Image (tube, helix red, strand yellow):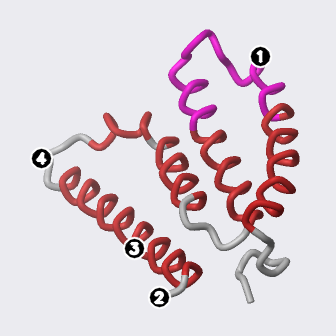
Amino acid sequence: MNSEASYHLRRQVLWGLVLVGLGVAFLLDQMDIFDIRSLWHYAPLLLVVVGINQTIGYPSAREFSNGLWTVFIGLWLFAVLEGLWGLTFGNSWPLLIIISGITMAVRPIAERRFGQKGGNGHGK
């Protein structure tokens, strides 16, 4: 199995497991076994998992840099919603500019290191 096919398989398995997990959580909530509201503040960490999945065995430099962006957004949302380090939406927006610059700088480096497979991120 080539790396692109294994990437898409892993991506589909990840999303399937996320849906199963959400379904189980909602079912347990409906049965009054578990209060799902206690998990909502961890929701941004799903973005971190998705981003890490994009960066491992990625089919293109674009997918890698998009994965880094997704990881950062998840961590940023978690930090802001939890009030870590005094971050709020109002005082932390410059971090979005910084990560945009990092993403733009990393993409050409990743393209040189790993090659560019198609312009759409799906390979040839």
- Which comes sooner in the sequence, label 4 or label 2? 2
- Quarter of the image where the C terminus is located: bottom right
| Residue at x 49% of width, y 71% of height | 11
Q: Closer to us: mark 1 or mark 4? A: 1
Q: Closer to us: mark 3 or mark 1? A: 3
Say which residue label 3 marks: 13
Say which residue label 1 marks: 91
Q: Which span of residues is magenta-colored?
A: 75-96
Specify the amino acid type for callout 4.
Ile
Which of the 4 image quarters holds residue 59? bottom right
Determine the CA span between mark 3 and mark 1. Answer: 37 Å
Specify the amino acid type for callout 2.
Met
Q: Residues within 10 Å of mark 4 (few under 14, many from 20)?
A: few
- Which comes sooner in the sequence, label 4 or label 3? 3
Secondary structure of residue under mark 1: helix
Q: Closer to us: mark 1 or mark 2? A: 2
Instruction: Name the residue at the top extreme.
Output: 86
Q: Is residue 26 left or right of residue 97?
A: left
Nearer to us in this view, 96 or 105? 105
Say which residue label 4 marks: 33
Q: Is residue 94 left or right of residue 81?
A: right
Q: Residues within 10 Å of mark 3 (few under 14, many from 20)?
A: few
Secondary structure of residue under mark 3: helix
Q: Closer to us: mark 4 or mark 3? A: 3
Residue 21: x and y in percent read 30, 59
Which of the 4 image quarters holds residue 22? bottom left
Q: Residues within 10 Å of mark 1 (few under 14, many from 20)?
A: few
- Which comes sooner in the sequence, label 3 or label 1? 3
